[in-house]
């Protein structure tokens, strides 16, 4: 079918051969062409349009229903619109829009989601979200989320939070690596590096801050960390640019060309210029230890005092350290100090007696030696009584002497009825006191009512 001028059909049109229309074509219902269809101007179809072979329109094409072309569809310089704005071909600007009105600003523009199940190739992509198994960019830079990820295809660099990367990978901010971290070239970090899993660097590593590796660190090149390295370091030792030097009392050391062993110059015996080491039992020996020690010493045989080691004793031993016995007591010859109290009550002095007298016996100056027992026939004052536990004893080194209480509270041998506060003087029994208001040497501190001899507490004046 060949039409030189316009073609107008108020009903459907079915053509089994080639259809060529030189003018405008307006079909109010369906059109079906089983062979080549050529429209030199506008094509308007109100219903569905089916072309079993090639379709070519030079002018504007508008199909209200379904457009099905089995062969090649060629539209001239006019725009093509499918389903209002579901698909728009802007022939003037050579642009295509999906779900967007005429006026696209780029060659291919999609409003809404775009699902591509096969390869999608484009010179430039601007999208809110992209989900893909693999994304390949051949030319032109790529920017994701305003610079969160930037791909510089000109210089083959990637920037994270950086749109001007100066290395293959430039990260501005903290980088957390939870799995293996491997770097083949030189690594320079201006801040702290923390790697949770294994880290392998095939070249030089420079870290300005601290480096913490929670797993193995392998460095083939030189490792420089000004803030220190925490973790297990594996690598070529002689490239660490460091050496180990043995300090005082240590042996070994050297450059890091192989394994290095440091040994302590120590011993458990008393040896000069050696470190102290414990033996198999945890003990060590030393000469003089000068230190502030905290804790309890389990034992010591001697203590160093006044240029000599001295043992301790609770008896009178020259050049020994004073120790208390099981009762908390100790003995000494001369003690220099100030006594603020006394355990016993009387002041006594050593005298030579003509015989042995029991405690509390009243004595006087006389007899074959220095003292003897006091009787009622004596018209002199008694000296005192025999004491067994004086609070203070004078002239204690008198050989063969006996302690006589001169002052204080003492036990006194008495006889007869005695009231507390009465004076005590001589009785008819030698060495035994009784009441005497005229010549007394002590005052009774308690009553006594027995007629036979006994002992009471009294104070010697």
Image (cartoon, grey):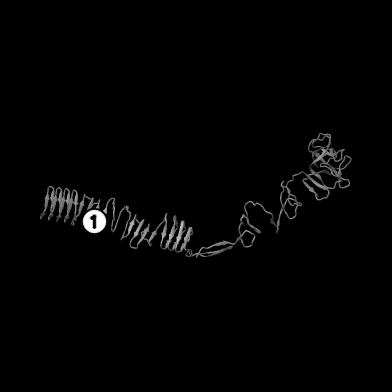
Q: Where is residue 114 in the image (x, y as percent from the top left)?
A: 28, 52
Q: How many labels does the image show?
A: 1
Work out whether residue 155 or residue 427 is closer to the camera in this orientation and state it: 155
- Helix, strand or loop status at disc 1: strand
Image point 41% across, 59% down: which residue?
Answer: 182
Q: Mark 1 points at which residue?
A: 95
Residue 169 showing in the rendered view: yes
Work out whether residue 13 or residue 165 is closer to the camera in this orientation and state it: 13
Work out whether residue 32 or residue 357 is closer to the camera in this orientation and state it: 32
Q: Where is residue 122 in the image (x, y as percent from the top left)?
A: 28, 57
Image point 45% across, 60% down: which residue?
Answer: 218
Instruction: Using the image, determine if residue 369 lies above or below residue 134.
Output: above
Q: Position of residue 76 (x, y in %)?
A: 18, 57
Circle 1: is it few (<14), some (14-19), or many (20+) Cα within 10 Å? some
Q: In which quarter of the image is residue 22?
A: bottom left
- Left or right relative to 255: residue 273: right
């Amino acid at each position: 079918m060949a039409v030189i001028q316009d073609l107008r059909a108020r009903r459907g049109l079915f053509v089994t051969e080639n259809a060529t229309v030189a003018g405008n074509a307006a079909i109010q219902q369906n059109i079906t062409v089983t062979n080549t269809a050529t429209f030199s101007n506008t094509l308007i179809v109100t219903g569905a349009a089916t072309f079993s072979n090639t379709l070519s329109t030079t002018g504007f094409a508008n199909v209200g229903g379904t457009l099905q072309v089995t062969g090649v569809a060629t539209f001239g310089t006019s725009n093509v619109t499918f389903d209002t704005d579901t698909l728009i071909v802007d022939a003037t600007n050579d642009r295509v829009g999906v779900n967007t009105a005429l006026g696209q600003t780029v060659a291919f523009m999609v409003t809404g989601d775009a699902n591509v199940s096969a390869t999608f190739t484009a010179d430039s992509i601007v999208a809110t979200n992209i989900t893909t198994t693999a994304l390949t960019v051949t030319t032109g830079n790529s920017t994701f989320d305003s610079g969160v990820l930037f791909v510089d295809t000109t210089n083959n660099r990637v920037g994270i939070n950086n749109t001007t990367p100066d290395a293959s990978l430039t990260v501005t901010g903290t980088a957390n690596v939870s799995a293996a971290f491997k770097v083949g070239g030189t690594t320079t970090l201006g801040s702290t590096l923390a790697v949770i899993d294994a880290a392998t660097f095939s070249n030089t590593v420079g870290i300005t801050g601290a480096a913490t590796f929670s797993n193995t660190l392998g460095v083939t090149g030189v490792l420089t960390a000004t803030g220190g390295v925490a973790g297990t370091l594996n690598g070529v030792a002689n490239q660490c640019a460091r050496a180990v030097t043995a300090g005082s009392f240590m042996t070994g050391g050297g450059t890091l060309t192989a394994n290095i062993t440091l040994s302590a110059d120590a011993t458990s015996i008393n040896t000069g210029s050696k470190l102290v080491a414990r033996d198999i039992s945890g003990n060590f020996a030393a000469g003089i230890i000068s230190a502030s020690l905290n804790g309890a010493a389990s034992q010591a045989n001697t203590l160093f005092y006044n240029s000599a080691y001295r043992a301790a004793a609770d008896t009178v031993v020259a050049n020994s350290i004073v120790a208390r016995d099981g009762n908390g007591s100790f003995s000494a010859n001369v003690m220099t100090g100030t006594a603020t109290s006394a355990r016993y009550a009387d002041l006594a002095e050593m005298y030579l007696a003509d015989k042995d007298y029991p405690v509390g016996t009243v004595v006087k100056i006389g007899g074959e030696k220095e003292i003897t027992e006091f009787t009622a026939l004596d018209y002199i004052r008694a000296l005192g009584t025999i004491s067994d536990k004086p609070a203070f004893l004078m002239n204690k080194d008198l050989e063969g002497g006996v302690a006589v209480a001169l002052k204080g509270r003492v036990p006194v041998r008495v006889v007869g009825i005695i009231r507390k506060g009465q004076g005590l003087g001589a009785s008819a029994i030698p060495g035994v006191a009784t009441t005497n208001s005229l010549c007394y040497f002590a005052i009774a501190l308690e009553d006594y009512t027995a007629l036979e001899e006994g002992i009471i507490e009294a104070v010697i004046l």
